[in-house]
Amino acid sequence: MSLDVALLRKDFPLLEREVHGRRLVYLDSAASSLPPHHVVSAMSTYYETTHANVHRGVYATAEEATRLYERTRKVVGSFLGSAHGEEEVVFTKNTTEAINLLANSWGRANLGEGDVVVLSIMEHHANIVPFQMLAAERGIELRWIPIDREGRLILDELDTLLEGAKLCSVTAMSNVLGTINPITELAEAAHRAGALIHVDAAQAVGHLPVDLVEWDVDFLSFSGHKILGPTGIGVLWGRAQLLEAMGPFLGGGGMILDVSTERFLPAASPQRFEAGTPPIAEAVGLTAAIEYLSALGMAEVRQHEAALTTAALARITEQFDGRVSISGPGAAPDRGGVLSLTLEGVHAHDVAQILDSVGVCVRPGHHCAKPLMRFLGVPATARASFGVYNDLDDVEVLLEGLEEAARLFS
Amino acid sequence: MAELEELYREIILDHYRSPRNRGELETPPAHRTEGFNPLCGDEVVVTIDVEDGVLKDIKIGGQGCSISQSSASLMSAAVKGLPLDEVRAKIATFKTLMSVHEAQLEDAESAEEPEPVDLRSLGELAALQGVVKFPVRIKCATLSWNTLTQGLDELSA
């Protein structure tokens, strides 16, 4: 069954907004997705009927709040194909914090002088800088999986790169190129080399069906606000025995078993990694987002976004042949709904500014992936990215804006 | 669209397409300063040659959008050959043009009547006033000016 996009668009009130006298055309879902009203109303219902702090109170609403918060771990686990979410899902504030947690808690327990972490050249800064910080402090070595001109990982030398590595940390889908990486293959190679693998799935969860059993990874991270959920909540999923062997991350209330003036004893995982009052309403919103996506069906979501991407690439090529270049692996099966555009003679900032004047939201810049941009040799691109609510009408307005940019700068 | 035409005036597009004083002076004797806008990745390299209190020469390198590049080009043309106190005055006037409007946008209700900027004293630079309607782009327009200021400060330190 294909999605009825015209119908589901009604679930996203922001799409009814106008800017500069034009219909808002939201093409920035790779930065943050729009929430359906289900998510917003679940959160406001929670605040109006239930709210209390979790894990503390004995009264009815505090117990309800705790149950809703803890239930989200199960919901996230099931969505990713795991039956043990309650032990494996750690809540963070976003993907960035999830990777920092991993680099700090797992890294400090397992990495020392000369140890190797393998990243790829297409990573977001969130999957680079935490390891660079650790490298500077501990003298670990970072190695980089290269990419080819089409924006795919070059895996010929992967086994050599992974030799002696303790961790491989790669993105499931590039936020610049749209490349969908072969995670199962990468996980096999990492495990063969005796390394663990973490997947930055910020651009994948919510856009593709994700199956932890098939991927066979050890850690995975993503953000709520990129899968139609709220900001302020992210997830680090990890194998239970790995999480249990990791030290705490932030210190404070909620992450301890006992505290005296001499020492503290950390709580069991996952509470050990969640100091302070957690994002409770956001967890409720995340559950609502996952339920919304599950009702649509992730295979259907992917099918719609893939078809839209293929059609958009064809339209842009048809109308702008030679004037617009798009990074990434073309209209291939391993291509997600991210189009990084370069319009000849017009800088990405100017493109984005002019697109705004016709109501189109895209993101200009380096997309927090400067090593990749250096490799591509482009200082900035204007990135249009799709969500489940986009359709070909949106692409037509994008083309209108691109024509306007070309005209102004001609 | 009127605001867009105001932003992308012909003078700005001209300086974007044919930037003046493009390149880098040899260092030393020239002084080199880099400026970055980490938000968008714009980079500017300002090399200046100061002799006897006069900005004898200036060249601009780097890359960025039409606003940052044209502003840098316009700046180089406006300050080249001027005594340093006049360079500083020019910078102050330009920054006022940008920041006064910035303050107005941030606090439209309570903003006091801004000190009027004499646009005639700015010459071609006045073409950049359309930028102030686009708050995000003010950083693009001021990047090269802040970098020049930093360079002058480093020289006088």
Image (cartoon, grey):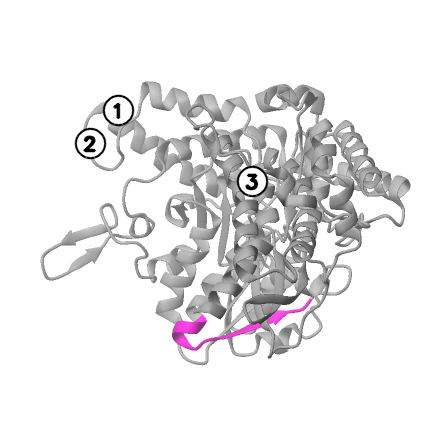
**Residue at image mark 3:** B97
The amino acid beneath tag 3 is Leu
Question: Is label 1 in contact with label 2 (beta carbons under 8 Å)?
Answer: yes
Residue that appears at 71% across and 43% down: A350
Up/down of A87 relative to A61, above or below: below
User: What is the chain letter for disc 1?
Assistant: A
Q: Is residue B82 visible?
A: yes
Say which residue label 1 marks: A61
Question: Tag 3, which secondary structure?
Answer: helix
Q: Residue at x 46, y 68 (%)?
A: B156
For the N terminus of chain A, the image quarter is top right
Number of the label disc, if any, that sits on residue A238: none
Chain bearing mark 2 = A
Look at the image and give the residue range highlighted in magenta: A135-146
Q: Mark 2 points at which residue?
A: A57
Quadrant of residue B18 within the rendered picture: bottom right
Count of labels shown?
Answer: 3
